[in-house]
Image (cartoon, helix red, strand yellow):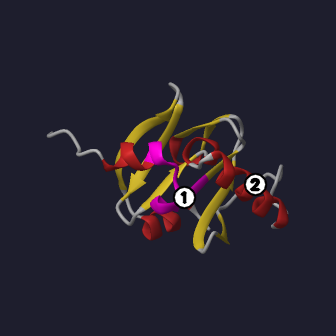
């Protein structure tokens, strides 16, 4: 799946914020998805389970040129490999992957940050 098609599904960026340390960014999209490095936006337990699912799909340490789709914890996940540093959708990356997942799967910190009202423009 292309990035253009993905954005049709998850919606445009509504909020972009740092969610971990000074480099872990994430974006809330208009259709309730959050994109970012899963090591920043999932709690530790969900992240370990998520990595197991990625491995079960044969994607761990695999370079992909398009977005992959699978289910995790009852939700659709969009996944893309990445080099460390900078990944798809302009996210900072440490884990070598970028995801778009439902906001309900995100850790408490990410949910709180994404729920903050936007500053007036």
Q: Is residue 22 left or right of residue 51?
A: left
Q: Crowding near pointer 1: few (<14 within 10 Å), some, many (20+)?
A: many
Q: Crowding near pointer 2: few (<14 within 10 Å), some, many (20+)?
A: some
The residue nearer to you, when weighing 75 against 95, is 75
Farthest-out residue, top: 22
The residue nearer to you, when weighing 6 against 43, is 43
The residue nearer to you, when weighing 88 against 37, is 37
Residue 118 horizontal/vertical position (percent): 23, 44
Q: Which residue appears at 68% of the width and 51% of the height?
A: 45
The mark found on residue 83 in the picture is none
Residue 38 horizontal/vertical position (percent): 62, 48
**Image quadrant assignment for residue 66:** bottom right
Q: Which residue appears at 83% of the width and 59% of the height?
A: 55
In the picture shown, does residue 41 fall above or below 46?
A: above
Q: Is residue 68 left or right of residue 56?
A: left
Q: Which residue appears at 14% of the width and 40% of the height?
A: 120
State the quadrant of the C terminus.
top left
Q: Which residues are magenta?
A: 99-110
Residue that numbered label 2 is attached to: 51
Which element is circle 2 on? helix
Residue that numbered label 1 is attached to: 100
**Image quadrant assignment for residue 95:** top right
Q: Nearer the viewer, mark 2 or mark 1?
A: 2
Q: Is residue 78 left or right of residue 20?
A: right
- Asked if the magenta segment contains residue 44, the reply would be no
The Cα–Cα distance between marks 2 and 1, rounded to whole angstroms, is 14 Å
The disc, 2 or 1, on the residue closer to the chain's N-terminal end is 2
Q: Which residue appears at 60% of the width and 63% of the height?
A: 78
State the quadrant of the N terminus.
bottom right
């Amino acid at each position: 799946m292309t990035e253009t098609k993905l954005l049709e599904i998850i919606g445009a960026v509504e909020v972009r914020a740092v969610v971990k340390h000074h480099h872990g960014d994430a974006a809330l999209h208009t259709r309730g998805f959050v994109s970012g490095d899963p090591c920043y936006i999932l709690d530790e337990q969900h992240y370990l389970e998520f990595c197991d699912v990625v491995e079960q799909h044969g994607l761990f340490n695999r370079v992909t040129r398009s977005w992959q789709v699978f289910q995790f914890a009852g939700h659709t996940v969009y996944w893309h490999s990445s080099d460390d540093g900078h990944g798809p959708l302009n996210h900072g990356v440490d884990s070598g992957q970028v995801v778009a997942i439902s906001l309900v799967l995100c850790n408490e910190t990410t949910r709180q940050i994404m729920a903050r009202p936007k500053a007036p423009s």
